Amino acid sequence: MSRLSRTDAHQDGTDSDDATSLAAMRRLPSVDEVLRVLDVEAATANAAHDTLVRAARAAIGEARQAIQQGGVPASRDSLIERANALMLEWQRPALRRVINATGVVINTNLGRAPLSPRALAAMRAVAEGYSNLEYDLESGERGSRHAHVRRLLCELTGAEDALVVNNNAAVLLVVLSVLAAGREVVISRGELVEIGGGFRVPDVMRQSGARLVEVGTTNRTRLADFTGALTPETALLLAVHPSNFRVIGFTESPRLGALAELAQAHNIPLVHDLGSGCLLPTERFGLGHEPTVQESLAARADIVCFSGDKLLGGPQAGIIVGRARLLAEIARHPLVRAVRIDKLTLAALAATLTAYSAGTAEGELPVWRMIAAPLAMLRQRAERWATELGTWGAYVRILEGQSTVGGGTLPGETLPTALCAISGSATKGEVAETAAQSSTDGARDVADLARTLRMGEPAVVGRVLRDALLLDPRTVQSDEDDQLLAAVKAALAAW
């Protein structure tokens, strides 16, 4: 065959392919045909007509692209199914509920502390209508939003006064802007921490206009280091609780009470950034000691600041307690308005604090319920999960494991737990007795299962360790068990 005839033959094949593709595209349903089906299926999805049209066009566009690339033409039913899936995906909120099976109680990526029923009811009551957010009902005049939590915070901590803003990083920025702008702040080098998202205490301090004076070394700082750094330009001493890391070995740091004495002798404030907001003794739950707000104030810190959504167990908030004179000065600063707390957060925070005031925090607040959960109860729940899931084509076993408190609190401290471990088959890690002993086979398959669970409704987030997907009942609330099992069964069916 000549070169020309070969070219002609190739051209004939291309024309034939183009004709086949064109015919396949003509057989695709029109947008109107897809819409007629979607209109019925979307009735319960509450989708706008524009969303339906966009989903139909997108599904048809994907089908055309597949045909152009030599793929199998989509059937009418599969195309409509794809359009329906796109519509539902676009309707689903970006921020949605997740079942936390990671075993990290205060999981920052998953929203930290879940709220109590009392807090949720308080938010709903305030959100449904108007409220006395900044209105004094007794006098009929303008009031302060801080009044709704001031009394509770003072009673619980022993502070003279209290105010709240939207998070604890904002507290540090506001306090330093008010009390130390243009002047020096003395801090131990070992307490220059980095918090979540790459934000660093030194960066926040510089933003406030304060001048940072580091003393001591990473592992050892003495009271004499603070004393030697004091000058007429010193505005305050700052102590930062290293709540998300631990330095062990050859270490030393001055007691908070000793720093308070030094600060008082030089008539400057001591600010303690406590972070975790702990009000209960953690030793009672088999954990190491976490400094409490009450202890910091008893040590005569002038200002103590902490988060609302860590061990306090409430919503995201930055809480300042301490000397009334200093807090009054802080409350007048314009930055306080810029970072002020909103009405829903205030309602949830007040409800959370009320649980402490009533003595019901341990049983009422989800964070403390999870921390206090007995190992026997956790094992019983994990065994129930394993029994139900073991018939769905996976190898399911119970492993000993450890839960963590998380959220920048109690670093290195763990709580014993029972884990429901899911693997591809009994040959993968069948001799493992603990989570740390699992083998490395089958990790990709388990990762696929974990992703399917994350993309489900509700989303379920567990831990993948080597060959197993680990589900920790400590952080799954008891009323979520059935939903978790249904989600895992659906994921296993598609695995």
Image (cartoon, rainbow, N blue to C red):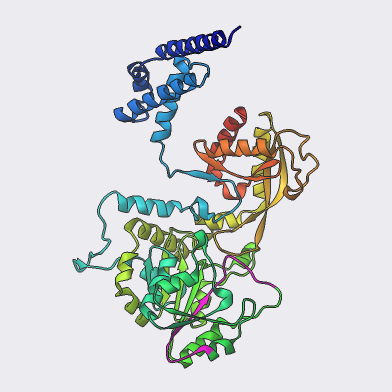
Kindly tell me whether residue 153 is visible in this rendering.
no
Query: Is 238 displayed left or right of 384 in the figure?
Result: left
Q: Which residues are magenta?
A: 229-248
Outermost residue, left side: 140
The one nearer the camera, 425 or 7, is 7
User: x%, y% of residue 264?
Assistant: 46, 90
Kindly tell me whether residue 307 is visible in this rendering.
yes
Q: Is residue 438 above or below residue 171?
A: above
The one nearer the camera, 272 or 149, is 272
User: x%, y% of residue 162?
Assistant: 38, 73
User: x%, y% of residue 18?
Assistant: 46, 13
| The C terminus: image quadrant | top right
User: x%, y% of residue 313?
Assistant: 49, 59
Residue under the image location 52 percent in, 55 percent down:
108
For the image shown, how many numbered marks are present on the structure?
0
| Residue 316 occupies quadrant | bottom left
Does the magenta-highlighted stretch encompass residue 240? yes
Magenta: main secondary structure equals: loop
Residue under the image location 59 percent in, 32 percent down:
491
Does the magenta-highlighted stretch encompass residue 355? no
Query: Is 329 displayed left or right of 398 in the figure?
Result: left
The one nearer the camera, 22 or 481, is 22
| Residue 494 occupies quadrant | top right
The one nearer the camera, 98 or 141, is 98
| The N terminus: image quadrant | top right
